[in-house]
Image (cartoon, helix red, strand yellow):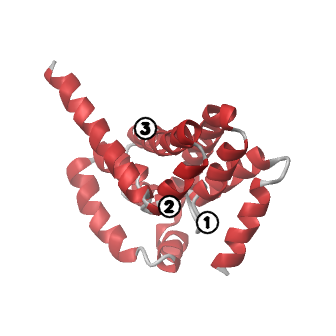
Amino acid sequence: MLHKTYDWMMAKAAHRHALWWLAAISFIESSFFPIPPDVMLIPLVLAAPTRWARIALVCTVSSVIGGYFGYAIGYFAMDTVGMAILSAFHLTEKFESFRILVDEYGVWVIIVKGATPIPYKLITIAAGAFHFDLAKFTFASIIARGMRFFLVAALLYKFGPPIRVFVETRLKLVTTVAVVLLIGGFFVVKLL
């Protein structure tokens, strides 16, 4: 089933309304869809490299808005819908350990986890279930998702098709380096 879904998304990436499909996929991936929007983001940027920033913006905004849906699931329906989604993706153990991280690091853990390939739905549903401050959740989501999608799109714009293989095989490394640089930048600014 996952392979069929992947093939369906690749077909949508070639569609004339691909940007709308990207927005829809980004939205639903934030709460329950199994495949990340990168599957459409990458071919879209490769097909229209000069539009990389617009494509990344659509992906980011849609993902953050979809994150509100995931947040609402966690906030209002954690015991039923939320647990069913997390169970379907084998994320229930991560959910329990995520609570400790959110309590200790708050916004930072959402930024770090939201920028990595860890399923964003875990973060959105958990944030709602933990009644995490919505303004802080919004801020962290914009930073995390923007960092992730703009980084991928910018790399594809700058380096073209050869970077596609690199990004797809080392996405976790690329986003981890970006997160480390972002956090390091915050500390440098704080010290100045």
Please determine whether, in this image, residue 104 is positioned above or below residue 159: below
The residue beneath circle 2 is: 121
Secondary element at tag 1 = loop
Where the N terminus falls, by quadrant?
A: bottom right
Image-based side of 151 in relation to 113, left or right: right
Front-lying residue, 96 or 165? 165
Secondary element at tag 2 = helix
Q: Residue at x 59, y 43 (%)?
A: 160
Q: What's the amino acid at mark 2? A: Lys
Please determine whether, in this image, residue 24 is positioned above or below residue 107: below
Q: Are marks 2 and 1 in contact (CB under 8 Å)?
A: yes
Identify the image quadrant of residue 107. top left
The residue beneath circle 3 is: 143
Q: Residues within 10 Å of mark 1 (few under 14, many from 20)?
A: some
**Residue ranking furthest to the top:** 192
Marks 2 and 3, Cα distance to the nearest angstrom?
A: 16 Å
Number of disc labels: 3
Residue 46 position in % (x across, y down): 66, 46
Q: Nearer the viewer, mark 2 or mark 3?
A: 3
Q: Residue at x 39, y 75 (%)?
A: 92
Image-based side of 176 in relation to 142, left or right: left
Q: Which mark sits nearer the N-terminus, 2 or 1? A: 1
The residue beneath circle 1 is: 33
Please determine whether, in this image, residue 51 is positioned above or below residue 104: above
Residue 122 position in % (x across, y down): 44, 63
Q: Which mark sits nearer the N-terminus, 2 or 3? A: 2
**Residue ranking furthest to the bottom:** 1
Residue 22 position in % (x across, y down): 69, 50
Q: What's the amino acid at mark 1? A: Phe
Q: Residues within 10 Å of mark 3 (few under 14, many from 20)?
A: some
